[in-house]
Amino acid sequence: MLTMLSFSLSFLFPGDNIINLSGQLNASSSELTQLNHYYQHDNNIIEQYLAYLRHVLQGDLGLSMASQSPISHEIIKLLPATMELSLVALLIAMAIGIPLGFIAAIKHNKTTDNVILAVSMLGYSIPVFWLGLLAILFFSIGLGWLPSAGRISLLFEIEFVTGFQFIDILLSDSPYKWQALNNALAHIILPACVIAVAPTTIFVRLSRAAMIEVLATSYIRAAKSKGLSFSQIIFRHATRNALIKIIRHVGLQFANLITIAMVTEVIFSWPGIGRWLIESIYQRDYTAIQSGLLVLSCFIFIVHILTDFIYAALNPLARGNKYGS
Amino acid sequence: MAREKTYTEEVFPSPFIQLWIIFRRTPVAMLGFGCFIFLVFLAIFSPLLAPYSPVEGNLEMILLPPAWHDNGNVSYLLGTDELGRDMLSRLMYGTSLTFGLSFVVVLISLVVGVVIGSLSALTKGLKSSFLNHFLDVVLSIPSLLLAIIIVAILGPGIANTVWAIVIVLIPQFIHITRYAVKEEFRKDYVLASRLDGASPFRVLYYSVFPNIVERIMSQATLAQSAAILDIATLGFLGLGAQIPLPEWGAILANGVERFYIAPWTVYLPGLAILFAVVATNLVGEGIRHALKVRREN
């Protein structure tokens, strides 16, 4: 489905669709005939699509129109940076949002609940680019605590192995390993926190709703009547059941988080796929837009499936339903 | 003992009026509603109210700070930008672009979405299942990402942004209308009017719509806060409103270069966006709260 969408984009973009697909701007006529042959351009549209699909599966996404280098190489370099940033942001959002939501649910309809709800409302109303700029002004320029751009200081030479900065640093045998690690950490904190704000507030609401629902169930009442203390009920019984409900929504939130990350990458000059995608829109680099979109949506899709699996693994009830019991 | 009412008349307000009565009782929601009305008013009348032109600058008054600042000038209440354009006027004109356009966007996509959604609720079988799966795929792509792609196809510009966001929002309305209509169709009162011989469209118009209008409105407020943020984000990225237009996101992007020497050119438009989104969200929360209270009664 996604590849179909991406394939149809090559017709929607202005220009010749074979050039849009391959990205070869200055191809001679003989090269063009060859390309036409590769992409089965003379046959009907279904065969063209299948040819395109074959190319994608072989990892050939064409050349970037702007730099004329293979897009798949660029994406392999850029995607880990985005993954790293969004995963850190997701962890921050979950680590802050879920406990806050639980607290709000336990203090339901009291001042604490209202304060948390009001703050979370403010949090998801803030435009992310504005928040990013304010954060740079305050923490980087005003206080000078954290760097404002990039992934790591240029002083450190880290060899590219996996693309994940932290793993690469740990794998490298540089004598300044720990300084580099600290530096990378300082670079990721600010953008990750900015990205995390909106998802945090959504996690607050989700976990609050889940916890309220769980606290109203009969097994919690049974636990209370057995004389268990309040903390025992919350930590042993309620938290686990509420967490399961939240995990199901993580996949959906992740898609949202990736969009926020795209904008934030532009502000913090983070060398990730979002910034690259937006720059290729400025440069009208249609091949890059097409493949960037394909890769990003596949990434979101994989996270969706993964969360579904984790949910099924953690929740026996979800597993049972599939067999129609 | 005087009896003012001979017969105890029972008045049944329509679902919408019931909702309004509950909505009126929550002060926070009313505050949000007041701000919302204020913004709508500003969006319509900003050309009459704004003291200066949003695009013509006064080169003698460049980068003037807001009036409460030591170097400020009262005739430029919120200061000026690098071309001497009055920030207050620009923000007021920006209301009709960012907020007003988002309102229009939501209205268009609401009408289209409700029509398609209610028609699809009446169909069964292959067509309906195709629509369902198609909607699932579209809904799983984040709205801003989709809007960016559509703008990439159409080319940057404010008109293209509007169309992109309309297209992005339609599936949400189709989805919610479809489910609401299907749910109502299962209820007894619909069955009663169908037994009376009403055609599906008559049932839809006279029985179902009055009962789902507030759910659609609650979705509309969600959609509008997303639309404001999307228009502003696209403007900020330079894909939406182009340079001289006083769109809030574009004003903000314009101020970024002089962020350090003239921070008000950045934080004022940001505050405007925040204000508009919070007002919209408060109205939405009010409606959802009122819906919940009504259901519990």
Image (cartoon, helix red, strand yellow):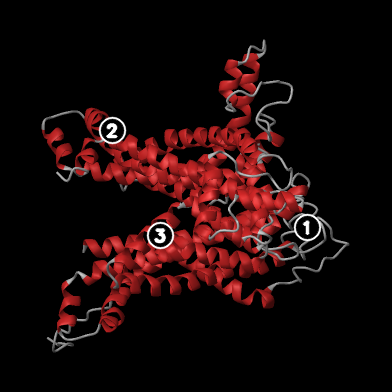
Disc 3 marks a residue whose amino acid type is: Phe
Disc 2 marks a residue whose amino acid type is: Leu
Q: Residues within 10 Å of mark 1 (few under 14, many from 20)?
A: many
* Foreground: disc 2 or disc 3: 3
| Image spot of residue B159 (x, y percent) | 63, 69
Residue at x 42%, y 62% (from the top left corner): B172
Q: Which mark is residue B134?
A: 3
Disc 1 marks a residue whose amino acid type is: Asp
Q: Is residue A318 left or right of residue B170?
A: left
Residue B142 visible within the image: no
* Foreground: disc 1 or disc 2: 2
Residue A94 visible within the image: yes
Q: Residues within 10 Å of mark 3 (few under 14, many from 20)?
A: few
Q: Quadrant of residue B22?
A: bottom left
Toward the viewer: A191 or A176?
Answer: A176
Q: Secondary structure at mark 3?
A: helix
Q: Which residue is mark 2?
A: A314
| Image spot of residue B36 (x, y percent) | 51, 67
Looking at the image, is A102 positioned above or below residue A122?
above
Q: Chain of mark 3?
A: B
